[in-house]
Image (spheres, rainbow, N blue to C red):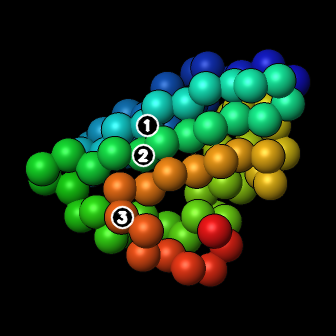
Amino acid sequence: MPIDQAQLDDFRRSLEADDYHLDVALEGDAATARIVAGPDACAECLVPKDLMRNMLAPMLGVDAERIELTYPVEVHTAGQ
């Protein structure tokens, strides 16, 4: 399944409104996603990783468990 670029762009804009920045890369049937917090972001305020993976999966066209996710601060222990 291809990337839903329009939905991904909208999602990026919503993150950018809170000074987060999302980089993604597809690698076959898997993906890596990295979220970086800017100076005005709350680095600890993102949803748990399992929820973020479930949100990203349909946009990236990969299964949620095939997304390697990096957060600015590793505070969410559930669903890593």
Q: Which of 70 and 2 is in front in this view?
A: 70
Residue at x-position 55% and y-position 70%: 48
Bin the neighbour count of mark 3 within 10 Å (Cα to Cα): few under 14, some 14-19, many 20 and up. Answer: some
Q: Is residue 70 left or right of residue 51?
A: left
Mark pair 2, 1: CA separation: 5 Å
Amino acid carrying label 1: it is Leu
Q: Is mark 2 on a helix, strand or loop?
A: strand
Q: Is mark 3 on a helix, strand or loop?
A: loop
Q: What element carries label 1?
A: strand
Q: Where is residue 6 in the image (x, y as percent from the top left)?
A: 58, 21
Image quarter of residue 20: top left
Q: Nearer the viewer, mark 2 or mark 3?
A: 3
Which numbered marker is on residue 35? 2
Amino acid carrying label 3: it is Val
Q: In this view, does 17 lie to the left or right of 26?
A: left
Q: Mark 1 points at which residue?
A: 22
Which of pointers 2 and 1 lies earlier in the amino acid sequence?
A: 1
Amino acid carrying label 2: it is Ile
Which numbered marker is on residue 73? 3
Q: Which of marks 1 and 3 is in front?
A: 3
Q: Is residue 32 left or right of residue 39?
A: right
Could you tell me if residue 55 is visible in this image?
Answer: no
Mark pair 2, 3: CA separation: 10 Å
Residue 34 sits above or below residue 5 on the image: below
Marks 2 & 1, CB-CB < 8 Å contact: yes
Residue at x-position 47% and y-position 31%: 23
Image quarter of residue 63: top right
Residue at x-position 59% and y-position 57%: 52
Which of pointers 1 and 3 lies earlier in the amino acid sequence?
A: 1
Q: Where is residue 35 in the image (x, y as percent from the top left)?
A: 42, 46
Q: Which of 22 and 59 is in front in this view?
A: 22
